[in-house]
């Protein structure tokens, strides 16, 4: 059985994520608002797809 070793890349990504979230007091709405503002300020064109409809399965054999 392999022994688990901490991954320095994963640790760094998690530290950056936690620091970013801490800037917004871990408020998901504030984080999303900030990301939307950064996206808009970038001047780039972003693609947005409509949500996919979920296929409803029927139990009556149709």
Image (cartoon, rainbow, N blue to C red):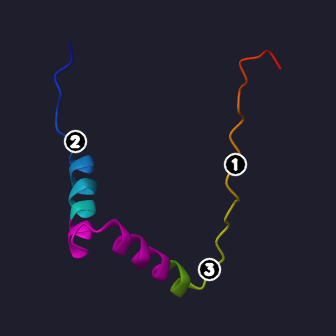
Q: Residue at x 83, y 20 (%)?
A: 62
Q: Residue at x 20, y 69 (%)?
A: 22
Which disc is residue 52 wearing? 1
Mark with earlier residue (1, 3): 3
User: Marks 1 and 3, how far apart in space?
Assistant: 24 Å
> Which dot marks residue 31?
none
Q: Is residue 24 magenta?
A: yes
Residue located 69% across and 60% down the image: 49
The local secondary structure at tag 2 comes to: loop
- For this orientation, the residue located farthest to the top is 1
Give the structural element (helix, strand or loop) at label 1. loop
Establish if 14 lies above or below 40: above
Relative to 9, residue 16 above or below: below
Pointer 3: residues within 10 angstroms few (<14), some, or many (20+)? few
Is 40 left or right of 28, judged from the image as shown?
A: right
Residue 52 image point, x, y percent: 69, 48
Q: Which residue is mark 2?
A: 7
Looking at the image, residue 12 lies above or below residue 22: above
Q: Quadrant of residue 51?
A: bottom right
Quadrant of the image occupied by residue 25:
bottom left
Report the disc number at residue 44.
3
């Amino acid at each position: 059985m392999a022994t688990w070793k901490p991954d320095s890349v994963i640790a760094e990504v998690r530290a950056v994520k936690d620091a970013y979230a801490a800037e917004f007091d871990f408020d998901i709405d504030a984080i999303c608002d900030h990301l939307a503002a950064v996206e808009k300020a970038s001047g780039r064109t972003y693609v947005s797809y409509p949500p996919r409809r979920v296929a409803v399965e029927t139990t009556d054999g149709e």
